[in-house]
Amino acid sequence: MASILVIGETDDAGLTAPTLELLGAASRLSADLGGGVALALIGSGLADAAAAAGPAGADSVYTADADSLASYQTDSYLPVAQGIVERDSPSVVLMSQSSMGRDLAPRLATRLGSAAIMDSLGLEVDGDRIKATRSCYGGNARQVVTVQTDPQVITVRPKSQDPLEADSSRSAEVISVDVAEPTLRARTTGKEQAEADGIRLEDAEIVVSGGRGLGGPEAFSDLERLAGVLTAAVGSSRAACDLGWYPPSQQVGLTGTVVSPTLYVAIAISGASQHMAGCGGSKNIVAINKDPDAPIFSFSRFGIVDDYKKVLPALESAFAEALD
Amino acid sequence: MDVIVCVKQIPDPETPAAAFKVDEGAMQVLPAQGISPVISPFDAQAVEAALRIKDASGDGTVNVVSLGPDSARDAIKHSLAMGADEGYHLKDDAFEGGDAWTTALALSKAIRHLGVPDVLIFGRQAADWDQGTVGSIVAELLDLPSATVLRAVELNGDSITVSRVVADGFENIELPTPCVLTISNEFGDPRYPQLRQIMQAARKQVTELTAADLGLAASEVGAAGSRVQMHALFQPTSDVEVEIIEGDTPEEKASGLVNALREAKIL
């Protein structure tokens, strides 16, 4: 019996970065909680990802491998996840606060007679409970909560936990799970892929982001030019996305992507709490804003108080010169 | 098509950070001076989605349910002013101190009590606790298919076609009715009630329902029935000290910033 079950996710490269982070967190928690760490993988073509589970910190890995599970759908994944949890009977189930985790965790927890805590930033063991610290009120407050029923289902914000150093001497026992043909009520009929030219937001070492203060969608092409110089990804505040200035896939914030680059350049972004929930983990924030009282400055290491329209061309050439 | 929307009244999420205060002892957010509570913005978008489904289908009703103290009535009135037909307020001292589970339990009983509609709509999360679970829990309790975090909802004969926001794009999903949907901010602006509609809504009756009306014992709801326990509520502090780069021209500021980043070994 494992004490902690991580429901992981895979992509073309194997286990996703948030899955490795969850296994790191699970290993640290299980040292205090007792018991082992199991990983559940639901998908198709999982052999390589399953082989990476041991080195990443899992003692065992359940694989539910079927063509019908190639992409996440509530109705196909829910009974499989339920089956694995009931078989493993963990006291804690961890998932990423991803598109899948957001959708699956509350339904799974309810089906198991328990409850879910969403989007945790910090986890610590308290007796047989996990105390989770999570952001609320759009990032203005933090609460510390426990699930009093079992299993304790918890989703974890990407980049809030450190993965383990991969240890190739470790291996995990692979347990293959039978998959019944799913009964789909809600059915995914297609997917529109966001344009993915350039660097993925969540992987970027440098992110250049723009907000409502840009005044219009045209300014994002200036940001893209600056990003080109810095080899950076371009992000946007929710306000700018909601105005249709930039695609929702590039939104940084509570309801968008969480980034933690080395350098986050916030241009004409006021620094609303719900935006900081997405970029507050950045190692260094630089703000350019004409309002000296903008909240963004209180989170920033460096700031320029000026109209971005005047600063941006100068900044582009200064960076180009410095990085030449 | 008959639609039920579940809404929540919350402290205004646009409250400036400086006016946001927490009573750590009581584990409560203190009402900000002069800033009125509002319907959770995602919930107003959920009401908008419901009204569009009703309009597209040509008949049916949009009814609104909210669980909460007296102030929840304002979220219901706002929805009625937007064009919803009837309002139901789940109001009982026994509901106090509840969590997402007890809220969803009471809502699911209320929906059964009113009759399960063709479509049940929620905001993707209430902009106070930001958990985003109540819609999914209700779907599970009523054994209905669900789709969450949606930017578009369309009536397609007897079924519903939706566009779900995912990390790398959008998924198109088709659902039979009855089903549960949760609406995300990408859906677009909800209609703003006109004065005439606000006055009409003010005259509409809101039906109040207690735990007993829903067949729930006091021990099943509120703090007594909660599955999640809160141990602390506090405001995060930032320990960063900003260095403002000065200069007479934008060029000076720009080169000053680049130099500072180099000295700090960030570049």
Image: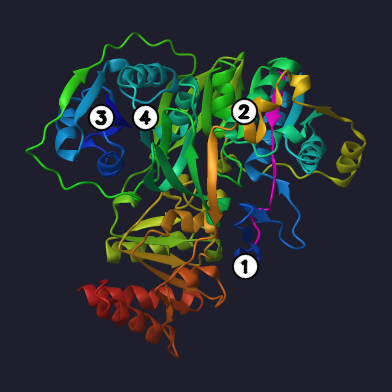
Q: Which residue is mark 4?
A: A91
Q: Which residue is mark 1?
A: B18
Q: Which residue is mark 2?
A: B104
Using the image, determine if residue B110 lies above or below residue B149.
above
Does mark 4 fall on the same chain as mark 3? yes
Q: Is residue B123 visible?
A: yes
Under mark 3, the amino acid is Ala
Helix, strand or loop at mark 3: strand
Does mark 1 fall on the same chain as mark 2? yes
Helix, strand or loop at mark 4: loop
Say which chain tag 3 marks: A
Under mark 2, the amino acid is Ala
As measured in the structure, the alpha-carbon distance from the residue carrying label 2 to the one carrying label 1 is 33 Å
Q: Residue at x 91, y 42 (%)?
A: B199
Using the image, determine if residue A263 lies above or below residue B192.
below
Q: Residue at x 43, y 21 (%)?
A: A189
Under mark 1, the amino acid is Ala
Q: Which residues are magenta?
A: B1-15
As measured in the structure, the alpha-carbon distance from the residue carrying label 2 to the one carrying label 4 is 23 Å
Say which chain tag 4 marks: A
Helix, strand or loop at mark 1: helix
- Among the two numbered marks 3 and 4 on one chain, the one whose residue lies closer to the N terminus: 3
The quadrant the N terminus of chain A occupies is: top left
Q: Position of residue B180 (x, y in %)?
A: 59, 23
As measured in the structure, the alpha-carbon distance from the residue carrying label 3 to the one carrying label 4 is 11 Å
- Among the two numbered marks 2 and 1 on one chain, the one whose residue lies closer to the N terminus: 1
How crowded pointer 2 is (Cα within 10 Å; few <14, some 14-19, many 20+) is rated as many
Q: Which residue is mark 3?
A: A38
The mark closer to the camera, 2 or 4, is 4
